[in-house]
Image: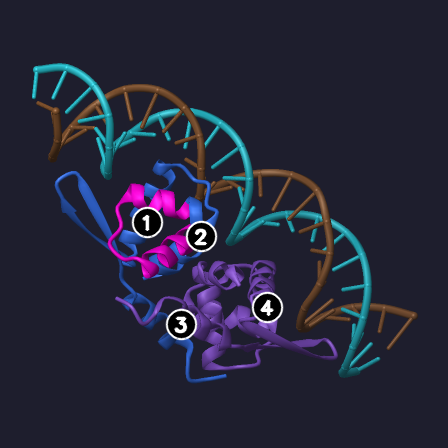
Chain colours: A purple, B blue, C cyan, D brown
Amino acid sequence: MGDVFKALADPTRRAILDELADRNGQTLFELCSRLTMKHGVGSTRQAISQHLNVLEEAELVSTTRDGRYKFHFIKTSPLLAIVDRWLAQD
Amino acid sequence: MGDVFKALADPTRRAILDELADRNGQTLFELCSRLTMKHGVGSTRQAISQHLNVLEEAELVSTTRDGRYKFHFIKTSPLLAIVDRWLAQD
DNA sequence: TTGACATGCAAGTAACAACTTGCCTATGGT
DNA sequence: ACCATAGGCAAGTTGTTACTTGCATGTCAA
């Protein structure tokens, strides 16, 4: 469960989630080019791939395979648990 | 704004927020002993103090001073913005 | 004012996380 | 079969972060 927080701690991974929120189901290469274009992210394919693995382990991203293409989908459900942990005081 | 995520990435800092959520307005020493007792955190006073600084910079904790005592309060407001960023798709 | 208590500062160390680099596997088109 | 494409694996490097250590500041009570 602490994986979720660590996953969200990196700005590149948050940009990936932003991009998937805008257009869900992208492949690795699709994400790479769109992150460079629209989000000013200058990371290599391998770097993005590793970030996607982190996001997948945190269950913030799910994937499906079709041949040589792997599609990535944002999963927002773990976010709800985050807020519920501390909310309702203040 | 990314400070909030980085602040939440550390398990000791999350335990601090848990403890403040349970009993708000604790001093540094109070937090240290209760973290050791109830949360199994074995960190020194200085370590906890540094964590509190990180939480304060992320505006997840606010403080008030009274003489030689400094009281710490949890602030949950930054958490709301987190979820709103990606929610409403999925 | 002396001593005990509550906290602050700052340099050094050690562990971890992001990124690079180079090579490998597998799928699909021609 | 061949080659280009999409992706994966793993070791090494660099930068960051958590933690320690030692000393300093400030407050209060006797």
Q: Earlier in the sequence, mark 3 or mark 4?
A: 4
Q: Nearer the viewer, mark 2 or mark 3?
A: 3
Q: Secondary structure at mark 2?
A: loop
Left or right side of B46 for A36: right
Numbered disc 1: what chain?
A: B
The residue at which mark 2 appears reads as B10
Mark seen at residue B54 = 1
Q: Earlier in the sequence, mark 2 or mark 1?
A: 2
Numbered disc 2: what chain?
A: B
Overall secondary structure of the magenta stretch? helix
Which stretch did the figure color magenta? B10-35
Q: Nearer the viewer, residue C14 or D30?
A: D30
Q: Nearer the viewer, mark 3 or mark 4?
A: 3
Given the image, on which type of amino acid does mark 4 rest? Glu
Mark seen at residue A84 = 3
The residue at which mark 4 appears reads as A56
Given the image, on which type of amino acid does mark 1 rest? Val
Given the image, on which type of amino acid does mark 2 rest? Asp
**Dot 2 alpha-carbon crowd within 10 angstroms: few under 14, some 14 to 19, many 20 or more:** some
State the CA–CA distance, disc 3 to disc 4: 22 Å
Q: Can you say which quadrant of the picture contains the C terminus of chain A?
A: bottom left
- In the image, are marks 4 and 1 on the same chain? no
State the CA–CA distance, disc 2 to disc 3: 18 Å
State the CA–CA distance, disc 2 to disc 4: 19 Å
Q: Secondary structure at mark 4?
A: helix
The picture quadrant where one finds residue C24 is bottom right
| Whether label 1 touches label 3, CB < 8 Å | no
State the CA–CA distance, disc 2 to disc 1: 10 Å
- In the image, are marks 2 and 4 on the same chain? no
Left or right side of D4 for B77: left
Numbered disc 3: what chain?
A: A
